[in-house]
């Protein structure tokens, strides 16, 4: 096999078409974060983005988008920002991971959202995690019937809160594919506030991420697009979400709600309305992303799997990287695998967030850096 490393923007029309053909032919690759459009957008904003083009007997059989950082440290495209990574290849292609790394000029490659079962990465997998899905292929009524049957108490509570919200604040409606940039700023403002309150890093404090989101918001092709949804009570926005879609799958990315309406559970309410609209627009599933949020466990009616692992070639860089990352990864997995520890860690982060917010100067809490 021949491996050529280029920037995504250097791919020609034939290469981009071939990428789409390979992705469309494999259901496991049906994720917008694996689309060539996302790689092109990342390339325009980040200088470290690359793609390995794999050929066999003169025919392109695969694409591996990745990030190449200093000292030969490799990361999946989007790394901490996205929820799915993969070697986008024809079925049956078996390219050893270390050979791929050598061709890419990498010493080490960590992954934690890799499509499970890919031959290239399988020997290096250390854990496989479930990803909760909202399967809409049989229609929304079939889906919501499953949710109602599996979690009758939760479903009844959410619908009761929805009626209460409507009585007190106005009719409930969801706007699908909201085009107004002001709606996006409302959503990112909520999300930035949530990051701070819960002790997380505010992603929208980085201007390039805001630019990426805005570019994705403007995309609307049959095979790829950004979907901004907003749930309203009367004329008041209460919860929203921005994600990406293929022709079949909508992927959760940035959900948020107005904390002033938290008692109504607007985020879960929004997810149900979003699923209904997704089904009506011909989408077959909503990927909610791996993670320990309780609401996902009763909104799901299907799962897929992603894998975690590490590949390294013998080098001083790989050794230093291993010493720095392995203890952290082990500690993280211990927390993820134990619900009590996960809840404790979540409470600690929220406490840190409250302390950090209380120390901010008055009048600065609602203005996230980099978001206007």
Image (cartoon, rainbow, N blue to C red):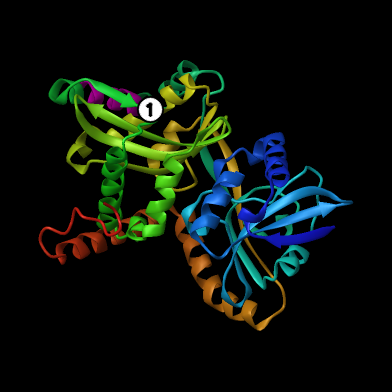
The residue pinned by badge 1 equals 176
Measured from the top left, where is residue 55 in percent x and y?
81, 53
Q: Can residue 49 be seen in this view?
A: yes
Classify residue 166 by image quadrant. Answer: top left
Seen at 50% across and 51% down, the residue is: 82
Q: Give the range drawn in magenta.
A: 153-163
User: Which sits in the foreground, 271 or 192?
Assistant: 192
Measured from the top left, where is residue 206 in percent x and y?
36, 60
Q: Which residue lies furthest to the right in this view?
A: 57
Any magenta on residue 154? yes
Q: Is residue 96 visible?
A: no
**Magenta stretch: dominant SS?**
helix
* Quadrant including the N terminus: bottom right
Mark 1 lies on a secondary structure that is loop
Is 113 situated left or right of 198 in this image?
A: right
Seen at 64% across and 70% down, the residue is: 108
Q: Residue furthest top?
A: 141
């Amino acid at each position: 096999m021949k491996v050529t490393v280029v920037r995504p923007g250097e791919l020609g029309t034939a290469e981009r078409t071939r990428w789409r053909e390979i992705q469309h032919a494999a259901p496991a690759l049906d994720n917008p974060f694996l689309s060539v459009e996302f790689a092109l957008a990342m390339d325009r904003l980040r200088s470290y983005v690359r793609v390995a083009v794999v050929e066999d007997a003169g025919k392109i059989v695969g694409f591996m988008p990745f990030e190449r950082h200093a000292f030969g440290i490799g990361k999946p495209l989007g790394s901490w920002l996205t929820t799915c990574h993969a070697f986008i290849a024809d079925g049956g292609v078996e390219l050893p991971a270390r050979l791929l790394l050598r061709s890419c000029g990498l010493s080490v490659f960590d992954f934690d959202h890799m499509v499970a079962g890919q031959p290239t990465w399988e020997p290096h997998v250390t854990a496989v995690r479930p990803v909760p899905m909202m399967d809409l292929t049989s229609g929304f009524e079939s889906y919501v019937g499953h949710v109602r049957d599996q979690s009758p108490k939760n479903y009844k509570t959410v619908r009761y809160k929805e009626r209460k919200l409507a009585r007190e604040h106005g009719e409930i409606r969801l706007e699908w594919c909201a085009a107004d940039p002001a709606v996006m700023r409302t959503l990112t403002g909520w999300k930035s506030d949530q990051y701070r309150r819960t002790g997380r890093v505010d992603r929208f404090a980085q201007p390039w991420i805001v630019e990426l989101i805005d570019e994705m918001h403007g995309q609307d092709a049959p095979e790829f697009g950004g979907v901004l949804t907003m749930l309203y009570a009367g004329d008041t926005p209460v919860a929203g979400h921005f994600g990406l879609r293929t022709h079949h799958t909508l992927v959760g990315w940035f959900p948020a709600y107005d904390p002033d309406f938290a008692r109504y559970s607007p985020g879960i309410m929004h997810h149900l309305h979003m699923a209904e609209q997704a089904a009506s627009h011909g989408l077959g599933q909503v990927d909610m992303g791996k993670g320990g949020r309780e609401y996902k466990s009763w909104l799901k009616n299907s799962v897929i799997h992603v894998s975690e692992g590490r590949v390294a070639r013998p080098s001083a860089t790989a050794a230093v990287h291993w010493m720095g990352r392995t203890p952290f990864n082990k500690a993280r997995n211990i927390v993820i695998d134990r619900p009590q520890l996960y809840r404790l860690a979540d409470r600690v982060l929220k406490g840190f967030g409250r302390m950090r917010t209380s120390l901010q100067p008055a009048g600065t809490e609602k203005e996230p850096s980099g978001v206007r």
